[in-house]
């Protein structure tokens, strides 16, 4: 299990129109290897987790806020 504030690396591309993105939050295409921070951890049964991951640019502006599974990210 990963935790809030962990830095993670995206394992695959996420297009800007992905259904896993938050509405109203700007999103650009995210690429495999992009670095993000877990801002929320969700679970229903203590076995399956999903993670809200925020990706920001070099100025700290949010590029995307995406809900991902543990298989889609890796701890760095």
Image (cartoon, helix red, strand yellow):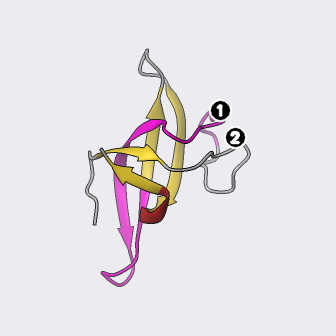
Q: Where 48 falls versus 50 (above or below)?
A: below
User: In the figure, is residue 69 to the left or right of 5?
Assistant: right
Q: Secondary structure at mark 2?
A: loop
> Which residue occupies the extreme right position in the image?
17
Position in image of residue 6 (x %, y %): 27, 47
Mark with earlier residue (2, 1): 2
> Which residue occupies the extreme top position in the image?
59
Magenta stretch encompasses residue 43: yes
Residue at the spot of label 2: 16
User: In the figure, is residue 39 to the left or right of 65?
Assistant: left
Decide: marks 2, 1 in contact (CB < 8 A)? yes
| Quadrant of the rendering where the N terminus is positioned | bottom left
Q: Which residues are magenta?
A: 24-51
Magenta stretch encompasses residue 74: no
Position in image of residue 29 (x %, y %): 66, 36
Given residues 63 and 34, the one toward you in this image is 34
Q: Secondary structure at mark 1?
A: loop
Q: Where 7 falls versus 47 (above or below)?
A: above
Given residues 32 and 27, the one toward you in this image is 32
- Residue 20 position by quadrant: bottom right
Q: Which mark is residue 28?
A: 1
Mark 2 surroundings within 10 Å by alpha-carbon count, few (fewer than 14), some (14 through 19), many (20 or more): some
- Residue 40 position by quadrant: bottom left
Q: CA distance from mark 2 to mark 1?
A: 5 Å
Mark 1 surroundings within 10 Å by alpha-carbon count, few (fewer than 14), some (14 through 19), many (20 or more): some
> Which residue occupies the extreme bottom position in the image?
45
């Amino acid at each position: 299990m990963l935790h809030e504030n962990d830095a993670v690396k995206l394992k695959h591309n996420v297009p800007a129109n992905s259904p896993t993105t938050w509405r109203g939050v700007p999103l650009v295409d995210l690429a495999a290897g992009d670095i993000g921070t877990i801002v929320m951890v969700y679970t229903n049964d203590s076995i399956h987790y999903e993670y809200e991951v925020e990706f920001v640019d070099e100025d700290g502006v949010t590029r995307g806020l995406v809900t991902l599974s543990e298989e889609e990210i890796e701890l760095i």
